Amino acid sequence: MHVISAVLCISIAIVASPGTARAQSASKVIERYIAAIGGRKAVEQIVTSDVSGRVSATDGRSGVFRQWTSRPQSLTVSVSWGDAGWRTGFNGRAAWQDDGVDGIRTLYGPAASRVRAEAMYANTCLVAPEKLDQVSLVGRDEVRGHAVIVVLALTSDGMPRTLYFDASSYLLVKDAQPTDAGVDERFFEDYRAVDRVLEPHRIEWHRNGETLRIAVERVTHNAPLDGQTFDVPAKRMEPPLDPAALLSAAGRREQQEASVRTSYAYTQTATFGRMDEQGRVAQEESVTTEVFHLGGRAVSKVIARNRQPLSETEQRREDDRVKNIVREYERQRLPGQAGRREQVDRGALPSVFVWMPLSVVDWPSAFLRMFDFSHVRREPVRGRVAIVLEFEPKRGVMPTSELEQQVHTMAGALWIDDASQYVMRMESYFREDYNRTVQGSSMRTERTLVNDEVWLPSRSETNRRLSWAFGKHSLLIQTMQCTDHRKFNVATDTAVTLPEPKQ
């Protein structure tokens, strides 16, 4: 936890620069687009939408297109042509996808962030608070012979989308976003008024090597939609599993494995930087540490900064710091010494600190108190069977700790290994602002099974937009990669033998 705090403190030193004229010009372009499609008031009156039409592929196959949206951020898209097709959605908790390759699965990582972003754009038509969508002017270009103004939009967790607006009408004619399979592009034409808002009725979609042409036949605004429209289309488990019982069991496993974790160490590299207005990570820095555990607490010893070993003086100072932690731990284990909870050093700016929830010893109890769990299902993950639980804040429950205050603003999904009953993965995002962290920011973490006996961290990410004075914002990106998981000998008496550093 000391290293996490140090990383956050250093990263605050690279706060984003003030808004520029370029960003202000981009905002004006968005304003003109909103005016062109009908105005902010008309757009904000659309609570739900149901869009349907016909799909044709370049090889002659045809099918059906359907898209549902519901505010604030629910989305389902279904596209089929011939014997091919896919579905994706977001229900306010978890993003999911169903295709002919991997089947139905809950999305994790950038794929989940992209679907959350799509849900926001589809519901707001870019009518969103500035803090949720950082925009910058890229320049001018041409799209199919028409002059366009190009704007780059970044969500609160850094998902980029390039928007192309007609230079005369200011209607959106194209958008593009990078994906794991290449650039996903959509072209929009034939805008028609529906309830005083212009909607595109011809869409050409380039996705995963396919070109699909969609002819929209019907657009319905504000029709009642069942919440299940946006849920993952997975079969309900039979017999059903109790989410609270599952998480309680996972909490017990955390406690049982605490003693096993004390026999393991690993190398952790924390990389952090600021994303600029063009979506590039700038001013990147890193800290490499050796991590081991004492009484359930992760202890980190710095061995390198920016991939360069510490100087002799720095290393001696770091060795002394870690030895003091060990001595204090040994003192508390002596008879008659009352234990005390270790405090986390948060540095000079505690208001920007956030917990990586699965790294906190008492996270299971906080989750059980503050979250409602639902939509329990089984899915394959990395060759294992996982039980997926979606979570969102409980209503009417007041937080009693700082960890509870944070998690009460979050939603997402947990993956629990079916065989070991251990949490192996978590995907989450902030549904509300938390201190300076802006809603839409995301956190995710994964664990790996080592020697078939203990789950240890493998990778974590935080992608957070922070708010500052005078309306300024910065987008901080932090990753923690854990490697070289290894076992070492632990003394059986009160003296703790530190693991040898990995060479």
Image: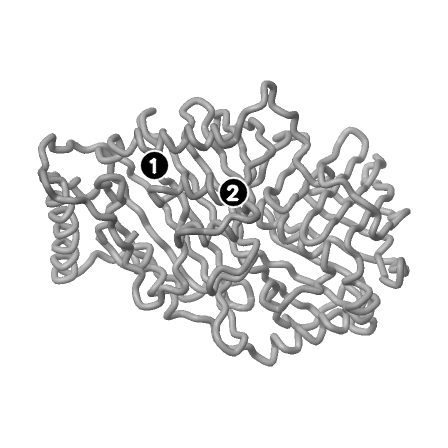
Pick whichever of labels 1 and 2 is earlier in the sequence. 2
Question: In which quadrant of the rendered view does residue 136 lie?
Answer: bottom right
Label 2 sits on residue? 371
Quick one: 49 or 173, which is closer to the camera?
Answer: 49
Up-down relation of residue 136 to residue 457 (above or below): below
Up-down relation of residue 233 to residue 230 (above or below): above
Q: Position of residue 292 (x, y in %)?
A: 23, 42
Up-down relation of residue 93 to residue 8 (above or below): above
Q: Amino acid at mark 1?
A: Leu
Q: Position of residue 160 (x, y in %)?
A: 59, 58
Label 1 sits on residue? 456
In the image, taking residue 91 as reference, residue 470 lies left or right, namely: left
Spatial CA distance of label 1 from label 2 is 24 Å
Residue drawn at x 11%, y 33% is 491
For label 2, count other residues whose C-alpha is less than 10 Å away and answer few (under 14), some (14-19) or many (20+): many
Q: Position of residue 498 (x, y in %)?
A: 14, 41
Quick one: 477 or 497, which is closer to the camera?
Answer: 497
Give the structural element (helix, strand or loop) at label 1. Answer: strand
Q: Amino acid at mark 2?
A: Phe
Q: Position of residue 278 (x, y in %)?
A: 56, 66
Give the structural element (helix, strand or loop) at label 2. Answer: strand
Query: In the image as oriented, which residue stretches furthest toward the top?
Result: 239
Question: In which quadrant of the rendered view does residue 90 lie?
Answer: top right
In the image, taking residue 367 as reference, residue 153 lies left or right, namely: right
